[in-house]
Image: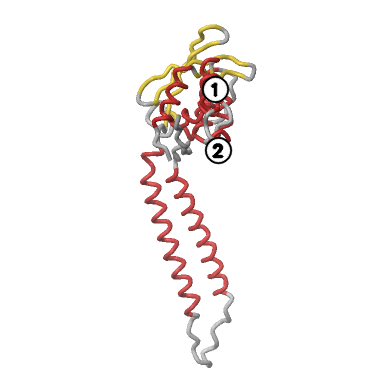
Amino acid sequence: MRLPTLIAVSLITVGSGLAVTLSLRHQSGRLRQQLAQTRERNATQPAPATSTTPHIAPNRSVSAEIDAARSEIAALEARAERERTATISTDLAPPGLTRLEDLHDVGRQTPGAAVHTLLWAACRGDDTALANTLLLEAEARAKAAAFLADLPDSAREKLPTPESFAALFLSDGLTKVTAVRIGEATAIDPDNATVRLEGIMNRELQLPLRRATTGWQIVVGEKQIDWAITQLRASPAK
């Protein structure tokens, strides 16, 4: 069986425009500091001679340096303002939704917290934390393990466990998601529950969770692993 070479999955970078703006603000601040230093050096220049001596022209190189610094500061601040304005619409989540970049690691002591932490890990590309939020059912784990066993060594190094394999495709499914709504948890029994999640593929999902010794985890079934394997085999070979 011919298997494709795995490709790395990149998470969407939410708020990159904000990072650009902050960088420009930093450059502007640095230039302001340089301008202040230039003015200070100019102030320490010898005082003009008395009227009985020939007039000494101002230091043209210092004046030119000040003018250049002022122009660069103005240009940077104008660009930063344009970047800030352009990103306002993307920085704001729709009403009732939470941006993925605003999520945090809140542990897995409740079903809702486990979903929150899963999305946080996926958004930040923390593969270990993401895999820890997943619980593969026995059939799903066996199928994923068998598939991974047939991969080249280089691929198995990137996907050492069935959980890391499931995490890869969960991350892939979240690459175009920017904001979500984590709904109420519904208890099925003391060790099983579901959590409503909105904002994924424009529909509502009911995520199954199970209580483990380390906290609640999202249950991954055989159907999800079958889908992941199908997607990987269908991808173009490199």
- Residue 81: x and y in percent read 39, 51
The quadrant holding residue 204 is top left
Residue under label 2? 154
Q: What residue is shown at x 55% (from left), y 25% (from top)?
A: 162
- In this view, which residue lies farthest toward the top? 189
Q: Residues within 10 Å of mark 1 (few under 14, many from 20)?
A: many
Q: Is residue 225 above or below residue 68?
A: above
Mark 2 vs mark 1: give the one in front. 2
Drawn side of residue 147 relative to residue 213, left or right: left
Picture disc at residue 45: none
- Residue 107: x and y in percent read 59, 25
Q: What residue is shown at x 42% (from left), y 52% (from top)?
A: 80
Q: Is residue 90 above or below residue 37?
A: above
- Residue 151: x and y in percent read 52, 32
Drawn side of residue 211 relative to residue 99, left or right: right
Picture disc at residue 134: 1
